[in-house]
Each structure stands twice: as C-alpha cells, then as structure tokens.
C-alpha cells in the first residue's frame, strides 16, 4: 500500500480492477483505494501477470502492506530497475503483520511511581548537601563523607563549599603527614561502613575464678579469649538469632557458628576464624587457636582462615582496659569484648562478708536493629554461666 | 579622540564598501537620510549607487539579498529595528538559513538588527531576538558588547560566507565610547573574559555586559570577585570558555535581556549542566527579562529587564549558597 | 528578386515558427510523460512524501523556459516540469530528486519539486509561495551592480500565490527598481481546493499590473503559439529595459494539488469549458492541422521521450539513498563557525 498523502496511515480498497491470471502493462491501474482525502488508484511498476491478490474490497490496510504479487520476466525486472533496492524505496518489504497490529495489542501495564515527594525546588543548602563539584572532587581523591567530618562549612546553612574543601586540603598539605598503611586504610573502611548502623553496647561483670583455675590445669593453655569464644559459640548454637543479619525486612540466620577473634597485627587488627566453634570442645580448639594467633601476628593468615565469621571476640583486657565499646565488623551484628580481670571485693552472702574475686567486664556491642538490650543481656548472662563451668566447654 | 559604538558600525560599513566592490547596503532610509540611527550617514554620497533605500518590505529585502549573494554580491541589509525583522522572518530562516544545506551554495548575507531596549521605546522598538534566530540552523548570530567588537565583528560578518544576524544594541550606540578603533580582533566564535574573577562566573552578552561589569565592581567592594564572560556571538556559542570559567569559580549566573523561555541563558545553563555538571558547586542560575512584551513606560521598562540592582541581587544570592 | 527574397524570408520565418513550435511541443510532451511517470511511481509507493505535477500547464511553462537564455535567472515553481527541462534542467536531476537518490542536486536534503541549481541559474523553491520572486530580483540587482546587461529574470507563481505578502513585496520591489523581471502567473483556477473567488476580488489579475506600475500581458495558457509569442514578447521588453512584465495566463489545473489529492472539488463545468482543454492535445492538433508533423512523427517523439524517462528511472532506481552516517550534518559553509551539537 503506497503512502498516498502525508499523514495517511491506511487506505480502504474500494475496487479490484484486475484478477488473478490477468496480463497487465506498466502503469496500469490495479486497484482503487480510498483515503480520508481522496479516492486514488494504485498502479503496476512493470508489465507482468497477476499471481496473487492479498486484499479484499471494502477492507482497510495499513501503508506498507503487500497488496499482491506480479510475475514478471527477468528482462522486465532489469529494464524497470526492480532488481536492486531502489533509492527511495520504503514500501516493498513490509508485510501486513508487522504493521502495528501486534504492537497495539499487548497488556496494559500498570506503572507505579517508586519515588514520591521530592522537594521542589531541590534543597541545595545544609551541612549534608554535596554539590556535584564536591562529589566529583572527592571521588577524584578517593574520599568519603566521613573524611569531611572536621571541615567547617561556610556555605548556606553550613554547607561545605568547594572553597572550604580546597582550603582544608591545602592545610593538610601543610601539616606533617605519613602515608596510611594498606591495613590502616582497610580497617578505616570497615569501621566507617560498620558505623552506618545504630550500635549499642551492654556490659556484665563476670567472675573469672573458675575459668582461670581451669586454665591452670590445661596444657597447652587456652587463652582467656578462647574461653569466651567457645562460650559465645555454645550460646549461639542454642539461639542463633542475636547473630542474625538484618537485610531489608529479613533477619538472615547464620548457617554455621564460625566465630572470629581479634588479633593485633602491625597498626591494625586481623580476625582469624574458628569454624564450627560450637561443634568442638575447647581443648581441641586450643592448638588451632594458638596457630592462628601466630600466623596473624606474622601477617601470614591464609585466606580461608579469615572471613565468613558470624561474630567476633576481642580481648581488650590485654591492653589493661576494663571497659570498651568495640565496633562489630561491617558484615556482623555482634562483637563480644573481654576486659582486664581485677581483684575486687564481692559480697558473699553465706559468709556474710566481702571476699576477693577476679572480675572482668564482658561487653557485647551489637547492631541495635537486630536485637535490644534484653536479648543482649540474656546472651551475656548465658556466656557468664558457661564460663562458670569451664570444664563443660 | 573617541569613537562611539554607532560610529564604529558606520566606519566598518565604510571600510567594507571601500575594500570590496561586492558590498552594498539596502534598507529603509539608509540612503541620503543616512539611516534611522545614522548608521549609514554620508555613505550613500561616498559610495553612489551602493547604499539603497528599500521600500517597507522586509521579506523582499532579504529575498533580494539572497539573490544578490548567490550571484556574487555581499549585501548588508539594515532592518530599521530588530522588531521588524519578523516580517522577513521566513526569508531569513527558511530561505537564507537553509540555502547552503539544501543546495551546497553558500549565502553570504549580513542582516543588521538594531536591537535591545531603550527607555520609552515600547514593545516594538526594543526586542532582542538572538535566541530565535540562533534556534534555526544555518545562521551565525553576533551580539557585540563593545565598540571594538561592533567594528571588527561587522567587518568579519561581511566576509563570512554564511548568513549573519548582527544584533547591535541601540542603548550602546551613543553611550558606549572607546578611544580608537581596533586593528586586530578575536575571531568570531570565541567568548571574551571581560573581567577575571574567582567566586562566580557571570555569562552575558551585548548591553548586559556593561551592566555586569558595574555589578562586578560593586561586589568587589564587598569582597567577592565576579568573573564576567562576554559571549560576543550567541551562535556559535563558545562553550569552552564558559566551561573553563566555571571550572575556576564553581558558580554560574547567566544574564540576558531577552525573554526567559528557551533563551540564550537557557542554552548556556543547559550546556554547563550537561557537560560540566561536576564543575558546579551550586545550582546554575539565570536572569532574564519578564515573560511579557516589553513595556513602554520608563518605570515599567526598567523593572522589566535585568538591571545592576537585580543582577547584583541574583549574584549575591548565588554567592551565599 | 525582391519577391523571392520576401518569399524566402517568409518561408524562413514559417519554418522558424514550425521548428520553434515543434521544439516547444516536444518539450511539453517530455514533461507530460515525466510527470505521468512520477504519478505512477507515486501510486506504486516508490516516492516518499508527495508528487506534484504540472499537467495542463506545459504550454505556458515551456514557453518561459525556451524564451530564457544562458545567463538569465529562473525561479520555477510547482508545475514547471516543462519550463525547467527547457531551461536546461536534466531528466536525471528531476528523477533523482523524486526517487531520493544521493546523487541528485538536493542530495536527499529536499525532494520532489523543491530542487534547483543556483549556479546554473535556476532556484530551488521554498514552500512559502512568492518567496523566490525577490530572490530573482536580487540576482538581477547583482547583475546590474556587476555591469552585466541584457539578462532577464523569470519567476512563476499561481493564482493562489498572488495573495501572499511576498508576491506583493517582490513585484513592488521589482517595479521600484525597474528590474527586468518577468513574473508569470498561471491562473489555473484553484489553489489546492480554493477557487479564485476565495482568493482575490479584483475582476482580473491583469488589473494588478496597473496597480504596481508594470506592464501586463494576458494570454490563453492552453494556446502554445500564443504562449510562445506573448512570453517571448514580454521577455524581449524586459531585456530591453522596460521594467517588470506581469503575464497572466488562463488555464485549468488538470491534476490534483498533489497526487494524494483527487481534486474532486474542481467544478465540472470548468473541465468542459474551452480553457479546460488539454494544451498538449491542442498542440498536437495544431501540428497535425498545419502539416508541421504527422501522426508517425508524434508517435516517434512520444516513444523517444518515454524511452528517455524509463531509462532514467531504471538507472536512478539502482542508485544509493543518502546514508545518514556519511552525511555531513552541517548547515554552515564556514566550518570554523560550527558548534559541536551534531556529534553523536
């Protein structure tokens, strides 16, 4: 069907002027069609005979639809230049089906906006507003918003402008600086990412006498942190919910109780992991634990000995600290901390007097989105109870 | 000795007529009368037969210019006011502007538009139409802001093989003076940093450049250094110079005397936002005339267009962001 | 002796008339065959956009083309296939433009009747009617500036086009400048579907000549001999410096405004009126009647022209269409003034 006018999309066949088998001449009118502007005829491009007619009278066909077929001699096809694709040829190759019918059907999809309520005009002020230039410059330098924490903003409502930022960078250039080690940068990144969650810490003082007495009887001697690690593993094997991860509105439960422990190495921290710490008794873990500590200190931990733990234990008591609020690894909900033991007086109700006990703070720092103080307290209480019967660990 | 913007235009035409026998000037009252603004004073006498009075027929004037240009002449058409060029709009945009693209034969015509507002001139003697001509393909649009540019860009316009719309600002005609005419010039297509700055880039053209410089002086006293960029030609628009300036300052204010919708200011902001997004330390701003016809009464006229006061205010707002 | 000289001069004059008439007829015939070919290509869907024919106007149009010479300027309009070919446009240029060949004069950037070759003295029309007349004026002004004398500029316009502001401004301008402009108005009774009583109120378009202060000529647009004579006379006067010449030719458009239009609004009475007759047929009858050609000659001329057109169409159909990726998307000839906006 030719394009019979600028905005014409279809035409109705009003009369077929030839029939199958007819011999026709060049330019002979083959059928009459009606558009909304006029009644016109469609003619033959060369002599030949009609082999097929694909249209019916009083039916409407889109522009480009094939109306019929002509058989012509090879000589005529060549003579009228019909053998090669013509300079302006649009209509020839299009079959009726491809002209809009399939595409006009098809389900109507409901589209719901996912973004609502953007402020218009967008707010370009305030301490948290980052201009494209700021973002581009920070990306260039590999910086994050945390790196700007100390920069005072002179822009509207405290916005940090590019000038403020460049001034800050210039000042840094002037101060003495040393390159942060890869370890330091990695720890910084992990802590920054972890801190994006709301973290809380609870503590429980624990009597270590039984644990320390048990430890004296062992060879090799398990570190105090290993007792805490094993106790945490046992407690989590009883109820693993506190170590779950919140992803969206799901709590993802741990698949195996792999617990890591923090080891100071150079100017950072490494976290080797005891796999399935709930399934081995304490004494069978000791050798492996000591081995991992040594490897960590030498920075020779194999890859499969780190990562994948569901909780970490850190013994900040080795630094003499009695209290700390460690930050869990970004992929973990919990970190169990152990403070330094001290001899403190404890009221013995039976004896009616104060008696000396070795006491240390057990802290639990946790992602408060996953558990609250109550669950944290119960976990610590269970660990304390397990540490009071070390022979069962 | 000093020369005004208008005298520069007259001198440029005299030089063009003198140096190139193909040049002629055609427009209303340009002959013995010397033109409504005297831009062609004495030229008809000095160059007999080459400075011709046209009937009030902007369509035929431009059509004739096209025909003459194809046959080897270099016509300069003086529209009496930019506002009247719309009567010949079809010939400018559909005939002259499309001629080279359709035929491969260049169409070297120059059309001078006395443009821009002066107090009391009203809706039909004040318009700035550069954006409308720039929108159509095939035209060069010049908007000189200085006496020197009025001279050298008009000289260059006549030598360019394509249709040039030369928007000369009527307010600058007799108010803007320079010591002497230049001997060399920046080529068309390059914008000029009229004033170096640090805290903000103010892009503008034509008479608004002068207003912008006044504002920049004022703000300098307040501790802010504004960089003023004079586009010189609106098409081609020197995006590189604008971008380099915004790279230095991080803030952009574009000022134009024309109407807001789709104007030159919108074009500059669009380019900087899409190609220089990471250069912006604040949202780009623009300041235009109000979206109404240009009023007649001086009070209304003064409030309709950007002024040093409104430009200063817009600049301060942007600096405070 | 004197009588023999007079007789010989008369015979020469007669044979010149015969030759001129036959040449003009053959020009009309070629144009008609070419237009018919465009019509059938259009109906076969081989032409993008529109097809616009000059059927019924060949006598007038060929007269214009034949009376112009090299160095003159011509602004043909929609129905000037005959005039263009007579002035020197090639069949290939016409076919290439219609079929969208990249080798055509417009290289696919414009199509159908919007074609021309300014360097050869004929302009490609813009669609705004009347706009090209002042361009012809300008070319004539350039000739004057350059001291070129004896050239003439011709422009075609229709009855509808006489209503435009551009027509008015251009004719007035030509009159004020006393330019050698020959403005040929084909009053074919319709502007698309609009009859002349909705187009103008003056009794006769010829009255405009007085209004503009130019010479006016009326002619029967279907009478080839009259067209040759009147157009020739007007061109001569213009060439002699007598100022613009306005020619009003009366005829009937024998096709739709475009081939998408079946022109069913044309008053049936016009089709049977004297001015509704086909100028080509009338010219044929004249040739036969005056013994200037026999049917065999007519048939041979028709066959030759048909051949020429068919060969052209077959050739062009093998040519490449414009390639958007090879296309130089630039609207300015000054490369240094282009912006980078057209890059992908």
Image (cartoon, coloured by chain):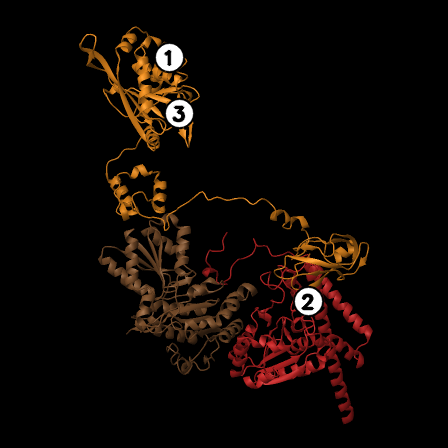
Chain colours: A orange, B brown, C red
In the image, residue A194 lies at what x, y percent? 34, 30
Query: Label 1 lies in what chain?
Result: A
Report the residue marked by disc 1. Answer: A285
- Relative to A229, residue C344 above or below: below
- Residue situated in front as seen by the camera: A300 or A220: A220
| Outermost residue toward the top in this view | A217
Secondary-structure class at tag 3: loop
Q: Are marks 2 and 1 on the same chain?
A: no
**In the image, residue C264 above or below residue A162:** below
Total marks placed: 3
Which chain does the residue under circle 3 lie in? A
Q: Give the vertical position of B130 relative to A145 (above or below).
A: below
Residue C262's disc number: 2
**x then y, percent, for residue B152:** 38, 68
Inter-mark Cα distance, 3 to 2: 80 Å
Q: Residues within 10 Å of mark 3 (few under 14, many from 20)?
A: many
Whether residue A282 is visible, yes or no, is yes
Position of C13 with respect to B235 (left or right) is: right
> Which quadrant is the N terminus of chain B positioned in?
bottom left
The foreground one among A385 and B156 is: A385
Residue at 82% over, 54% down: A21
The residue that mark 3 highlights is A244
- Residue B199 shows up from this direction: no
Marks 3/1: CA–CA distance: 24 Å
Chain letter, disc 2 residue: C
Say whether marks 3 and 1 touch (CB < 8 Å). Answer: no
Residue A115 falls in which quadrant of the image?
top left
């Amino acid at each position: 069907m030719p394009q019979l006018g600028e905005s014409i999309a279809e035409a109705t066949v009003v009369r077929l002027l030839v029939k199958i088998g007819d011999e026709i001449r060049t330019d002979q009118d083959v059928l009459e069609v009606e558009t909304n502007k006029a009644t016109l005829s469609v003619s033959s491009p060369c002599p030949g005979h009609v082999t097929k007619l694909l249209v019916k009278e009083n039916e409407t066909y889109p522009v480009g639809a094939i109306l019929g077929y002509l058989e012509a001699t090879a000589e005529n096809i060549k003579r009228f230049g019909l053998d090669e694709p013509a300079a302006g040829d649009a209509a020839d190759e299009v079959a009726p089906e491809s002209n809009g019918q399939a595409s006009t059907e098809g389900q109507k999809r409901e589209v719901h906006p996912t973004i609502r309520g953007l402020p218009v005009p967008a707010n370009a002020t305030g301490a948290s507003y980052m201009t494209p230039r700021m973002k581009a410059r920070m990306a260039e330098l590999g910086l994050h918003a945390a790196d700007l924490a100390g920069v005072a903003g002179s822009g509207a409502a405290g916005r940090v402008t590019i000038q403020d930022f460049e001034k800050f960078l210039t000042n840094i250039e002037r101060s003495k600086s040393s390159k942060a080690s890869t370890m330091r940068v990695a720890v910084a990144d992990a802590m920054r990412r972890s801190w994006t969650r709301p973290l809380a810490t609870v503590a429980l003082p624990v009597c270590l006498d039984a644990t320390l007495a048990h430890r004296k009887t062992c060879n090799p001697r398990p570190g105090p942190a290993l007792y805490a690690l094993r106790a945490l593993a046992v407690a989590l094997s009883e109820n693993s919910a506190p170590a779950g991860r919140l992803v969206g509105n799901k709590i993802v439960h741990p698949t195996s109780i792999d617990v890591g422990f923090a080891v100071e190495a150079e100017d950072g921290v490494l976290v080797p992991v005891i796999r399935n710490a709930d399934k081995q008794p304490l004494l069978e873990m000791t050798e492996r634990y000591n081995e991992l500590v040594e490897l960590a200190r030498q920075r020779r931990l194999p890859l499969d000995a780190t990562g994948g733990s569901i909780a970490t234990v850190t013994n900040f008591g080795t630094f003499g600290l009695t209290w700390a609020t460690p930050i869990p690894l970004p992929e973990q909900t919990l970190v169990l901390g152990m403070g330094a033991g001290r001899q403190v007086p404890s009221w013995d109700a039976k004896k009616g007097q104060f008696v000396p006990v070795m006491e240390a703070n057990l802290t639990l720092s946790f992602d408060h989105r996953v558990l609250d103080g109550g669950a944290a307290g119960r976990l610590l209480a269970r660990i304390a109870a397990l540490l009071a019967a070390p022979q069962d660990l | 000795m000093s020369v005004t913007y208008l005298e520069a235009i007259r001198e440029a035409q005299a030089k063009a007529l003198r140096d190139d026998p193909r040049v002629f000037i055609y427009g209303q009252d340009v002959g013995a009368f010397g033109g409504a603004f005297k831009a062609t004073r004495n030229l008809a006498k000095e160059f007999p037969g080459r400075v011709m009075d046209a009937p009030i027929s902007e369509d035929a004037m431009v059509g004739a210019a096209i025909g003459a240009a194809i046959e080897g002449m270099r016509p300069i058409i003086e529209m009496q006011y930019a506002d009247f060029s719309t009567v010949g709009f079809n010939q400018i945009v559909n005939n002259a502007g499309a001629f080279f693209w359709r035929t491969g034969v260049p169409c070297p015509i120059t059309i001078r538009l006395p443009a821009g507002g002066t107090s009391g001139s009203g809706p039909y003697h004040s318009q700035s139409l550069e954006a409308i001509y720039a929108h159509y393909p095939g035209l060069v649009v010049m908007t000189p802001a200085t006496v020197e540019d009025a001279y050298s860009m008009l000289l260059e316009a006549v030598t360019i093989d394509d249709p040039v719309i030369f928007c000369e600002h009527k307010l600058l005609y007799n108010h803007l003076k320079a010591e002497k005419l230049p001997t060399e010039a920046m080529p068309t297509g390059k914008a000029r940093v009229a004033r170096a700055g640090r805290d903000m880039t103010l892009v503008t053209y034509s008479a608004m450049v002068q207003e912008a410089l006044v504002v920049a002086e004022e703000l300098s006293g307040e501790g802010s250094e504004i960089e003023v960029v004079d586009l010189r030609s609106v098409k081609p628009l020197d995006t590189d110079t604008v971008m380099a300036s915004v790279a230095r300052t991080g803030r952009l204010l574009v000022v134009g005397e024309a109407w807001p919708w789709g104007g030159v200011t919108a074009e500059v902001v669009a380019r900087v936002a899409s190609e220089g997004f990471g250069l912006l330390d604040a949202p780009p701003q623009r300041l235009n005339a109000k979206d109404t016809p240009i009023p007649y009464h001086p009070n209304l006229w003064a409030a309709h267009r950007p002024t040093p006061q409104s430009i200063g205010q817009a600049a301060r707002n942007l600096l405070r962001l | 002796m004197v009588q023999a000289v007079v007789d010989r001069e008369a015979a020469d004059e007669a044979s010149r008339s015969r030759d001129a008439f036959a040449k003009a007829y053959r020009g009309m015939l070629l144009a008609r065959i070419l237009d018919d070919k465009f019509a059938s290509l259009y109906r076969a869907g081989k032409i993008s956009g529109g097809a616009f024919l000059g059927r019924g106007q060949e006598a007038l149009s060929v007269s214009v083309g034949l009376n112009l010479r090299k160095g003159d300027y011509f602004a043909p309009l929609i129905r000037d296939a005959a005039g263009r070919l007579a002035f020197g446009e090639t069949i290939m240029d016409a076919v290439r433009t219609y079929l969208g060949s990249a080798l055509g004069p417009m290289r696919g950037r414009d199509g159908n009747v919007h074609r021309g070759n300014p360097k050869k003295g004929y302009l490609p029309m813009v669609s705004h009617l009347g706009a090209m007349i002042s361009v012809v004026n300008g070319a004539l002004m350039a000739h004057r500036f350059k001291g070129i004398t004896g050239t003439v500029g011709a422009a075609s316009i229709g009855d509808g086009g006489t209503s435009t502001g551009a027509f008015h401004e251009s004719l007035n301008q030509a009159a004020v400048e006393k330019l050698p402009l020959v403005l040929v108005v084909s009053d074919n009774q319709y502007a698309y579907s609009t009859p002349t009583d909705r187009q103008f109120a003056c009794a006769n378009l010829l009255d405009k000549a007085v209004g503009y202060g130019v010479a006016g000529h009326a002619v029967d647009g279907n009478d080839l001999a009259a067209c040759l004579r009147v157009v020739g006379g007007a061109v001569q006067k213009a060439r002699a410096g007598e100022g613009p010449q306005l020619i009003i030719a009366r005829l009937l458009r024998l096709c739709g405004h475009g081939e998408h239009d079946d022109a069913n609004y044309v008053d049936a009475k016009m089709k049977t009126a004297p001015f509704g007759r086909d100028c080509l047929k009338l010219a044929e009858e004249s040739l036969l009647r005056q013994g200037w050609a026999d049917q065999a000659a007519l048939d041979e001329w028709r066959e030759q022209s048909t051949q020429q057109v068919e060969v052209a169409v077959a050739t062009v159909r093998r040519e490449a269409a414009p390639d958007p990726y090879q296309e130089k998307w630039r609207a300015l000839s000054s490369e240094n003034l282009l912006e980078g906006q057209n890059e992908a």
